[in-house]
């Protein structure tokens, strides 16, 4: 089948992409939009390295067609933080050694970002089970959990201070 | 000084933004082509007919290559030249590459590869250890045998004789980033290759042979890998070679990455092993003699199987003195993926054998396995620096008048740095082992369905490549006119933090802040003839080479400054970005500028070779290791006796990194290694069907530990002694040793099963819920 134009909103910008109906979102992001933060780990929706946020939900971008997300809001790791500064989660993953090889990290942080919106004050166990769809082969997860809990604490403290 | 500080990974600011580049993220020039392999669908046979017409005429296909089209060497083996890049008319396993499709896109190439029509004259396939042993299908003429004393006599005359068998499955590396390569053709037939490889020099070597050019015409660059674990020591050769060949043929850049399923079906894994044991002990459980038979499933080609199987033999003693011992190792050739390096490199397989023996002895004598382990430990005789501070913490200073003579390993090496007696005492205290063991027994007495288990296990792991010539490393350091430092060495970064550790060494030598050191990609054009970043040796070897390079430049600067100040070079100090001489302090950058003007060379190579090692692998005699790294763990688990499901409740680890170069990175290595080791023995199961096809070729069917599988309580601490050998800042290697702490999880599961009856659980690995359920039912039925 021929390629078609689709409008998708990525990291706050409207993008026009040309894709076959069965092209997966991860390939559009990486190959057309040069967003190589989301990584390809398994292409079967199990490892989570390609996790992005679509309309407020964590989605593995190897499980959806680009055609399915036309008109939707997509956030990738590149959309977190600002050019001048890191998002609290990014800072905490760096500070608490929540990464080793780094390949799972963009998906991990993108998922953690959504998790903390679903549940701003998670327990240790809630973090562990909330992150169970994202695989890491290096860290044993200890520092990933630590990073997320530290970020939650700081985000909550900032929220309280603002109120 | 930046050495010993818990600094974050150097690339962390890039990783958290998704800005760190892996091979597949490198922007490629327009016109870049992509490769996919067409692979064998049978385990053994002759290719009787190969029709590639439909593949050639598929849209987007630029070329299709078979073995007959390769211009030079058809070989990607790291050892015995027995591994063709593309099958040479015979296929040896399901997944063996037969032809390569070069096309305009990754998916275009993969789709086209499916259009081939291949017929085979099938031959009988040897898939299992039993198949291969029965058929005499092996590497080397017969088994390797290492030993000491008269094992058979010692066993036969011992009070108790215990026999058993442990089957241990293999393990998929599951690096999150699959294998990948990108070849960029240059003028005059030169080639640049970006590879996700732990061994850039070997990639260079194989690519040069494949192109029929000298190694000097090929440059290989590796910035980082998304995990390696040994799986990128030799398994990246095929991708780099085919990309380079296709790039040379078409004149265009060529890239290849394995899809996950292809990666798991094509590449080798951890060696599956069967350990048969027969041990004789006295009434206290002290081993009088032990006999091991190792049956190692190597797969279809030799790859690194011989040194892997050797290392299994070299760790058959683990931490225990075996006065009479015989180890027989069979390296079996099967029609499955060619098994390869994997964190521990055979060591874990050897070690799990003796740990099983310890457990079996304790069960037989009805005593705590911890006591049997401690009673069989090598004698304590390490120098005070290895543990003085720690001993005070334990509150038990040993005042020995004279150090006992060191005991020797089954390969006749004296163990002179043994610290496990003291480490064990400390961990038993901090983990409250005895109290919890009592609590576990009480729990099991009260609960018929959920049973708990607890186990301690130690690690003594030998550090050095057993192939002695590999224990060398090089470095290249430049200081530019503005005082900035360019750092390069032969080690590769796969997440372990090697670049960060080595940069900390360089910063410390110059007395500079870490920010002044520029870490750069591993590059065969900067540092030649490197060894694989493997055997845990990365920071030991490259740290020392970098130290040598930095010191050469620093000495030149010191001499230059001393001459100006009419003093000795030894009076010149480099600290906090300043160069101190007498009462004067000059910024490092100013000294560099002046030195440049005075025509002082500001660049140097550095070189290091590990001292003291001598090894005869045929006789099994010598000193293969520079030193040993130690660790110990206590794991507590719970099992559901109705389903076999299980959880790790708590893990306590005490691990020895000598004087750690970076405690945060080291603790991270230990945590990750433990979870990976526990995964190997408890949940990661490779299954082949009776046609030799791997049926667990994706994370949907092959389960690695997830965040929710991690121990509920996870306490990791570092032992604070120094390495007694002269290593970089007296640190110790950390990559592999803590992997084997995961053995305690397997033993804890066995302990929980033991609570279900009187017999020995005889648990096999991986102890999946099915295995556990089977063992529970056998004990309950007995």
Image (cartoon, rainbow, N blue to C red):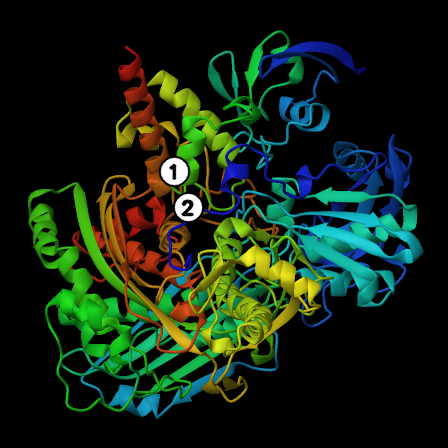
Mark 1, Cα crowd under 10 Å, few <14 / some 14-19 / many 20+, is: many
Please, what secondary structure does the residue beneath circle 2 have? loop
At 31% from the left and 31% from the top, the residue drawn is A149
Frontmost residue, A64 versus A89: A89
Q: Residue B707 appears in which quarter of the rendering?
A: top left
Q: Report whether mark 1 lies on the same chain as mark 2.
A: yes
**Is residue B120 in view?**
no
Against B464, is B241 above or below?
above
The residue labelled by disc 2 is A139
At 29% from the left and 26% from the top, the residue drawn is A153
Residue A6, labelled with which disc?
A: none
The residue labelled by disc 1 is A144
Q: Residue B212 appears in which quarter of the rendering?
A: bottom right
**Is residue B461 in view?**
yes
Frontmost residue, B486 versus B241: B486
- Percent coordinates x, y for residue B134 in the rendering: 55, 71
Frontmost residue, B436 versus A33: A33
Left or right: residue B235 compared with residue B33? left
Between the residue at mark 1 and the residue at mark 2, the CA separation in whole angstroms equals 8 Å
Q: Quadrant of the C terminus of chain A?
A: top left
- Pinpoint the chain carrying mark 2: A
At 12% from the left and 75% from the top, the residue drawn is B397
Q: Determine contact: label 1, label 2, CB under 8 Å.
A: yes
- Percent coordinates x, y for residue A85 in the rendering: 49, 27
Frontmost residue, B414 versus B164: B414
Left or right: residue B413 compared with residue B642? right
- Percent coordinates x, y for residue A119 in the rendering: 32, 19
């Amino acid at each position: 089948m021929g390629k078609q134009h689709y409008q998708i909103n990525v990291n706050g910008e409207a993008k026009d992409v040309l894709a076959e109906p069965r092209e997966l979102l991860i390939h559009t992001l990486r190959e057309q939009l040069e967003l190589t933060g989301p990584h390809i780990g398994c292409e079967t929706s199990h490892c989570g390295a390609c996790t992005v946020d679509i309309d407020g939900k964590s989605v593995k971008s190897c499980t959806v067609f680009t055609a399915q997300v036309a008109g939707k809001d997509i956030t990738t790791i590149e959309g977190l933080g600002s050019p001048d500064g890191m998002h609290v989660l990014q800072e905490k993953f760096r500070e608490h050694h929540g990464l080793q090889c780094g390949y799972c990290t963009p998906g991990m942080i993108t998922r953690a970002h959504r998790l903390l919106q679903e549940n701003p004050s998670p327990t240790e166990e809630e973090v562990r089970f909330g992150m169970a769809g994202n695989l890491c082969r290096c860290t044993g997860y200890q520092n990933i959990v630590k990073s997320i809990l530290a970020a939650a604490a700081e985000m909550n403290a900032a929220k309280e201070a603002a109120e | 000084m930046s050495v010993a500080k818990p600094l974050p990974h150097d690339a962390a600011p890039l990783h958290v933004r998704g800005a760190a580049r892996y091979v597949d993220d490198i922007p490629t020039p327009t016109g870049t082509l992509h490769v996919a392999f067409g692979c064998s669908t049978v385990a053994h046979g002759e290719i009787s007919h190969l029709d590639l017409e439909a593949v050639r005429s598929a849209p987007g296909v630029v070329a299709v290559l078979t073995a007959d089209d390769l211009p030079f060497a058809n070989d990607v083996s790291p050892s015995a030249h027995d591994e063709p890049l593309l099958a040479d008319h015979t296929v040896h396993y399901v997944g063996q590459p037969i032809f390569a499709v070069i096309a305009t896109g990754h998916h275009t190439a993969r789709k086209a590869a499916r259009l081939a029509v291949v017929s085979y004259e099938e031959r009988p396939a040897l898939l299992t250890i039993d198949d291969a042993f029965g058929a005499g299908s092996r590497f080397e003429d017969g088994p390797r045998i290492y030993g000491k004393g008269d094992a058979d006599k010692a066993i036969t005359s011992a009070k108790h004789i215990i026999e058993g068998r442990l089957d241990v499955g293999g393990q998929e590396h599951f690096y999150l980033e699959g294998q990948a390569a990108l070849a960029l053709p240059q003028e005059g037939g030169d080639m640049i290759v970006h590879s996700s490889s732990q061994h850039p020099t070997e990639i260079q070597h194989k690519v040069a042979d494949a192109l029929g050019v000298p190694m000097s015409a090929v440059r290989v660059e590796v910035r980082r890998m998304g995990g390696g674990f040994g799986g990128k020591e030799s398994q990246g050769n095929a991708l780099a070679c085919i990309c380079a060949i296709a790039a040379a043929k078409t004149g265009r850049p060529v890239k290849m990455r394995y899809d996950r399923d292809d990666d798991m079906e094509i590449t080798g894994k951890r060696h599956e092993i069967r350990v048969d044991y027969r041990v004789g002990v006295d009434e206290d459980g002290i081993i009088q003699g032990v006999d091991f038979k190792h049956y190692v499933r190597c797969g279809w080609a030799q790859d690194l199987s011989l040194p892997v199987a050797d290392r299994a033999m070299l760790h058959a003693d683990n931490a225990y003195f075996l006065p009479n011992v015989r180890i027989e190792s069979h390296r079996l050739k099967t029609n499955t993926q060619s098994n390869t390096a994997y964190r521990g490199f055979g060591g874990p397989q050897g070690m799990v054998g003796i740990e099983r023996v310890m457990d079996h002895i304790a069960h037989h004598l009805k005593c705590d396995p911890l006591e049997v382990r401690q009673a069989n430990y090598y004698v304590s005789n390490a120098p005070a620096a290895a543990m003085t501070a720690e001993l005070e913490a334990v509150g038990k200073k040993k005042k020995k008048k004279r150090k006992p003579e060191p005991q020797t390993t089954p390969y006749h090496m004296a163990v002179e740095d043994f610290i496990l007696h003291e480490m064990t005492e400390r961990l038993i205290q901090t983990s409250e082992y005895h109290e919890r063991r009592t609590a576990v027994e009480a729990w099991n007495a009260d609960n018929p369905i959920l049973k708990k288990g607890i186990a301690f296990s130690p690690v003594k792991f030998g550090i050095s490549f057993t192939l002695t010539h590999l224990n060398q490393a090089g470095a290249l350091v430049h200081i530019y006119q503005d005082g900035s430092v360019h750092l390069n060495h032969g080690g590769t970064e796969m997440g372990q933090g090697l670049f960060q550790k080595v940069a900390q060494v360089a910063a410390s030598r110059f007395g500079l802040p870490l920010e002044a050191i520029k870490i750069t990609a591993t590059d065969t054009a900067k540092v030649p003839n490197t060894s694989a970043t493997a055997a845990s040796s990365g920071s030991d070897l490259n740290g020392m080479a970098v130290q040598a390079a930095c010191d050469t430049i620093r000495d030149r600067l010191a001499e230059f400054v001393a001459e100006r100040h009419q003093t000795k070079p030894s009076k010149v100090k480099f600290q906090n970005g300043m160069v101190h001489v007498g009462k004067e302090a000059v910024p490092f950058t100013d000294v560099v500028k002046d030195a440049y003007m005075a025509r002082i060379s500001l660049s140097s190579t550095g070189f290091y070779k590990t001292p003291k090692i001598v090894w005869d692998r045929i006789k099994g005699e010598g000193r293969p290791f520079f030193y040993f790294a130690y660790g110990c763990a206590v794991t507590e688990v719970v099992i559901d006796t109705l389903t076999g499901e299980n959880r790790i409740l708590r893990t306590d680890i005490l691990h020895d990194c000598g004087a750690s170069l970076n405690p945060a990175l080291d603790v991270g290595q230990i945590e990750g290694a433990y979870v990976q080791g526990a995964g190997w023995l408890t949940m990661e199961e490779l299954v082949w069907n009776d046609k030799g096809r791997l049926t667990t070729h994706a994370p949907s069917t092959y389960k690695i530990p997830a965040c929710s599988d991690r121990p509920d309580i996870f306490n990791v601490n570092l032992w604070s002694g120094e390495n007694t050998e002269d290593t970089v800042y007296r640190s110790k290697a950390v990559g592999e040793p803590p992997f084997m702490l995961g053995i305690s999880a397997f033993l804890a599961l066995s302990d929980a099963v033991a609570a279900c009856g009187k017999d020995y659980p005889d648990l096999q690995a991986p102890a999946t819920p099915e295995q556990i359920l089977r063992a529970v039912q056998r004990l309950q039925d007995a």
